[in-house]
Amino acid sequence: MTPVTVPDLSEERALLGAGYTHVAGIDEVGRGAWAGPVCAAAVVLPLHRADLEARLTGVRDSKLCSPVQREALWGVIRGVAVGIGVGWATPAEVDALGIAPATRRAMERAVAELPLAVDALLLDYVRLPGVALPQRAFPKADVRCLSVAAASIIAKVERDRLMAALDVEVPGYAFARHKGYGTQLHRQALERLGPSRVHRMSWKPLQETKWTVS
């Protein structure tokens, strides 16, 4: 069976038909990185717009987009959405809580940052027990649901921009290039410099050697 790569509004409009008016799609990026925060985004689309899917042509799971495409779509989504919230979980929170609770915390913060009240959530696999709203969570929601795909792009662009800024603040690690993920370039920088204040010290690659945090 060929996987679906073009998201649509079927899940969102099913919730709309069930009486929900503002549905937030939520997704995150940065779970597997060795450094930097987890970033989550919540996106509420104007589901009554007849031209919504046409306006958001090209929006799909951020992993299927090039950096140039993501930057362009970030602007399109921000111009169309009726509400966007972005939430973060710091490397220290990842170390203290574990990646799954830290990810949920970032998502909850994204919902809290929305400029309007929502009455239902669509999520990529992860549920949020701390949010008292109806939730539909299932695998590949970022591939299937347009609002979740939009959230994946917002979160990815926001986090990439932060990692580029950290490349200036914490030089030497090439964060702007690998965004904190476990590339050979990143490992070489760690071997040369040791970990920085934005590394996740609970991650196995960071525990392989007794580092001095810079």
Image (cartoon, grey):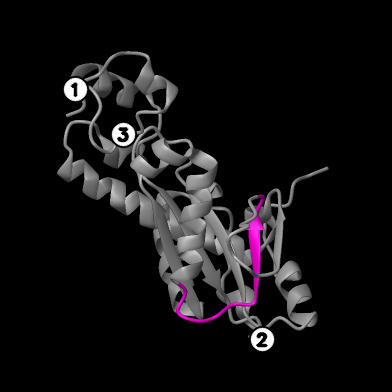
Give how far apart the Cα atoms at labels 1 and 2 are: 53 Å
Q: Which mark is residue 48?
A: 2
Residue closer to the observer: 83 or 209? 209
Q: Is residue 24 above or below residue 186?
A: below
N-terminal of the pair, mark 1 or mark 2, is 2
Depth-wise, is mark 1 or mark 3 nearer the camera?
3
Amino acid at circle 2: His
Q: Which mark is residue 17?
A: none
Q: Is residue 8 above or below residue 163?
A: below
Q: Are marks 1 and 3 in contact (CB under 8 Å)?
A: no
Residue 131, percent across and down?
59, 65
Say which residue label 3 marks.
199
Give how far apart the Cα atoms at labels 1 and 3 are: 12 Å
Image quarter where the N terminus lies is: top right
Say which residue label 1 marks.
193
Magenta part of the protein: which range? 114-125
N-terminal of the pair, mark 2 or mark 3, is 2
Amino acid at circle 1: Leu
Residue 109, percent across and down?
45, 62
Depth-wise, is mark 1 or mark 2 nearer the camera?
1
Residue 186 visible somewhere in the drawing: yes
